[in-house]
Image (cartoon, rainbow, N blue to C red):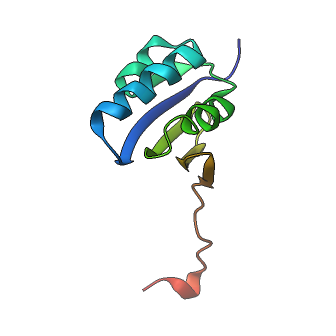
Amino acid sequence: MGYLTCFDINLLEGDEKEFQEFLNDLAEQSGYSEVKNGYAYDVKWYDWEKDAFNVSKKYPNIYFRIDGEGEDVGDNWRYYCCNGKYKYVEQVWPEVTKNDLE
């Protein structure tokens, strides 16, 4: 069994050709060939964060985002990374009370 996640990998800044090289290296590191196309759907890629972080250091001019959606409802997140620096953001719904309604 295991936990399945869908990954979409997007270039935010940088050269498109270099981004393709980045994706190829990330695919090799991860073992998921579909990563070469910028996605991996319903995979058990448990080391994705370590892999993305390590490969990003080889491509310091590539600023990218990974959108992730886990199999559990509400397990949505984004990972921004460039040259070994990153920010992980989970989707958070604000608390709404009756007083907030219009």
Q: How many marks?
A: 0
Displayed quadrant of residue 70? top right
Could you tell me if residue 39 is visible in this image?
no
Q: Foreground: 68 or 35? A: 35
Q: Foreground: 22 or 68? A: 22
Q: Is residue 62 shown left or right of residue 46? A: left
Residue 102 percent location from the top left of the image: 42, 86
Q: Residue at image x 52%, y 14%? A: 32
Image height check: is 77 above or below 99? Answer: above
Q: Is residue 84 shown left or right of residue 39? A: right
Q: Residue at image x 57%, y 88%? A: 99
User: Farthest left residue?
Assistant: 16
Residue 74 percent location from the top left of the image: 58, 46
Image height check: is 89 above or below 46? Answer: below
Residue 100 percent location from the top left of the image: 53, 85
Q: Residue at image x 54%, y 34%? A: 58
Residue 64 percent location from the top left of the image: 45, 45
Q: Foreground: 12 or 17? A: 17
Could you tell me if residue 58 is visible in this image?
yes
Displayed quadrant of residue 21? top left
